[in-house]
Image (spheres, rainbow, N blue to C red):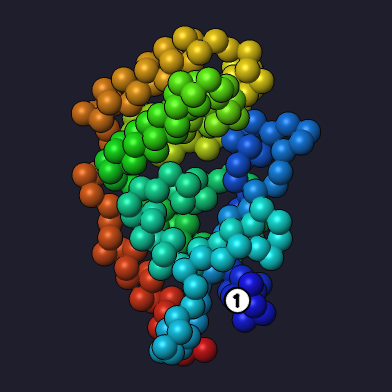
Amino acid sequence: MNDSALDLVRDHTVLSVVTGSRAYGLATDDSDVDRRGVYAAPAPLFWRFIKPPTHLDGPLPEQFSWELERFCELALAANPTVLECLWSPLVEKVTPVGEELLAVRPAFLSRHAHRTFRRYAEAQFRKLEGDLRNGGLPRWKHVMHMLRLLISGLDLVRHGEPRVDVGDQRDRLLAVRRGEVGWDEIQAWRAALAADLDQALDGSPLPPEPGRAEVEELLISVRRRSVDR
């Protein structure tokens, strides 16, 4: 990463949060500190042939940031990882623009979340089954996070808000991570969560579509203000 790219994260981050196991309530002594952030590149940078990067790693270990527009696109598509950033209980930095972003959080939510959370969890499950078919053991940490993803998605579809902290399921989920839960029990738990997620869709308080116009209005406002400065 060059210095100009680093400057985008250092000087233009509007929101920085801790995600991963520490935000989930599943941290152990060896857990990393996973940081995710949003930076708003000044609008004049987009007038050049070479545009600002849509995402960046660093500068801290386990740190990843999205440019505001890319972040909004992913959130409007109900990307689970991005929605998690907006609802993380561990906020390390928030600027006035970051506060505006958090204020429009409901506009990002829609029933599309049912499909994305279901699809992400299903893809993870198929990879884990592949490990078993090939004679290996599943990656138990991945098994735990597949179940956590379904728990979070179920809360979102059922209650209208994603659930990040799953600490009330900590003991059971960490037992999965340690490989102490049989595969048949894991399959049954996964199937039950997936069925509940499907059933919750009909009565979900989520709107059919996200509030794209509201989010776009915020994005345009942020871009215009960066030119004025």
Quadrant where the N terminus sits is bottom right
Residue 97 visible? The answer is: no
Whether residue 224 sits left or right of residue 92 in the image: it is left
| Residue at the spot of label 1 | 5
For the point 49% across and 78% down, the residue is 52
For the point 31% across and 20% down, the residue is 195
Front residue (pair 3, 85): 3
| Residue 193 x %, y % | 39, 21
Whether residue 121 sits left or right of residue 25 in the image: it is left
| Residue 135 x %, y % | 53, 20
For the point 44% across and 39% down, the residue is 162
Q: Is residue 69 above or below residue 155?
A: below
Q: Is residue 192 above or below residue 123?
A: above
Front residue (pair 124, 155): 124
| Residue 224 x %, y % | 40, 83
What residue occupies the far front of the structure in this picture? 134
Residue 53 visible? The answer is: yes
Q: Is residue 161 above or below residue 44?
A: above
Dot 1: few (<14), some (14–19), or many (≥20) neighbours within 10 Å? some
Q: Is residue 49 above or below residue 38?
A: below
Q: For mark 1, give the secondary structure.
A: helix
For the point 62% across and 81% down, the residue is 4
| Residue 111 x %, y % | 27, 41
Front residue (pair 132, 104): 132
Question: Mark 1: which amino acid?
Answer: Ala
